[in-house]
Amino acid sequence: MDVTVVAAAAGLRALAVARRNLGVREEPPGSNRTPFGEWFGENGVPWCAIFVSYCFAEGAGVTLGRGHPGAWRRGMSSVPLLEAWLRAITSASSSGRCRARGCARSRGTRPSATTRTAGR
């Protein structure tokens, strides 16, 4: 199966989870305390990337950032780390130089965003 098709399917499943969670709010307001932070094991912190990690894990069985420095067991905890991981796998994969664990070119079929095991 084409890497793009696999990634698109995972993204659509993650999007479905995100849509089901529309309206979830921090409790108390302004506290950064959410069910997603509780799931991640790091509640009360900025949760943008945690929410994305939750959606991919729950919807598609995907652990974002697997094998990347700074990745947690359940995914990525910050937007800068998530961005760095995405840039690293995109750059290496498109150049044909990627031999890192989880890279689309090193596996031949699936990018690291489609793996199911934990990072740290």
Image: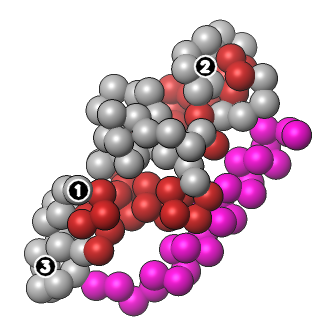
Q: Earlier in the sequence, mark 3 or mark 2?
A: 3
Q: Majority secondary structure of the magenta segment?
A: helix
Circle 3: element type = loop
Residue 92, numbered label: 2
Quadrant, the N terminus: top right
Locate residue 42, reporting x and y percent. Answer: 19, 56
- Name the image quarter holding residue 108: top right
Mark 2 closeness class: few <14, some 14–19, many ≥20 residues within 10 Å: some
Q: Check the image and name the residue furthest to the bottom.
A: 23
Q: Is residue 67 magenta?
A: no
Residue type at numbered disc 2: Ala
Q: Earlier in the sequence, mark 3 or mark 1?
A: 3
Q: CA distance from mark 1 to mark 2?
A: 30 Å
| Direction from residue 120 to residue 88 in the image, left or right | right
Locate residue 31, reporting x and y percent. Answer: 11, 75
Q: Bounds of the magenta span? A: 1-25
| Direction from residue 48 to residue 86 in the image, left or right | right
Q: Is residue 52 above or below residue 107?
A: below
Quadrant, the C terminus: top left
Q: Dot 1 corresponds to which residue?
A: 41
